[in-house]
Amino acid sequence: MPRFDCQACGACCCNTRRNRASGTTDYIEIEKTDVLFREHREQLRQLATRNADGVWFMKLVGDDERCINLEGDVGEGVGCGIYKLRPSGCRRVEAGDEECLAARRLHLFSAV
């Protein structure tokens, strides 16, 4: 398997094709066990939004509907503005897995 450099990518921090097709922006969920939810409520209110069910999700911004915390240019050089506080869903991402490759194809137009 090829080695992927997440800091040169950032595609997984952008809304998925399925969500975009259905108009859904509930992408990066913040669980009640996440540090951001438990210990940084003021920051949570600035960076996240609640859906109709009251579940918190990171705000998505821009045409590519990227996480509000993604800094830099997708496909060139990126970083997470809240890396130590990032939600558990972000912590579970694995470079090169099926979701990673799908995100790379959608946002980077690469033939991976």
Image: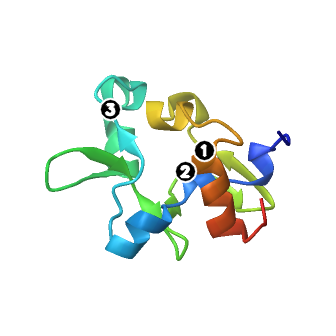
Residue annotated with mark 2:
69
- Give the amino acid at mark 3: Glu
Left or right: where does residue 68 sit relative to residue 105? left
Q: Would you name the residue on which mark 1 appears? A: 81
Q: Which of these two is toward me, 37 or 93?
A: 93
- Dot 3 or dot 2: first in sequence order is 3
Q: Which amino acid does label 2 sit on?
A: Asn
Does label 3 or label 1 sit earlier along the sequence? Answer: 3
Residue at x-position 55% and y-position 71%: 64
Question: Which badge, 1 or 2, comes first in the chain's sequence?
Answer: 2
Point 62% across, 68% down: residue: 106
Q: Is residue 1 above or below residue 53?
A: above
Res. 11 in view: no
Q: Which mark is in front, 3 or 1?
A: 3
SS class, disc 1: loop
Looking at the rendered structure, the secondary structure element under dot 2 is: loop
Q: Measuring from the top left, give residue 27's x and y in whole percent.
A: 40, 53
On the rendered image, what quadrant is the N terminus found in?
Answer: top right
Classify residue 23 by image quadrant.
bottom left
62 shown above or below 79? below
Which of pointers 3 and 2 indicates the residue nearer the eye?
Answer: 3
Q: Position of residue 112 (x, y in %)?
A: 77, 58
Structural distance between the alpha carbons of marks 3 and 1: 18 Å
Which residue is at the front of the view, 93 or 29? Answer: 93
Which one is nearer the viewer's eye here, 54 or 105? 105
Q: Residue furthest left?
A: 53
Crowding near the residue tagged with mark 1, few <14, some 14–19, many ≥20 C-alpha atoms within 10 Å: some
Label 3, label 2: how far apart the Cα atoms are: 17 Å
- Image coords of residue 8 (percent x, y): 80, 52
Q: Name the residue under label 3.
A: 31
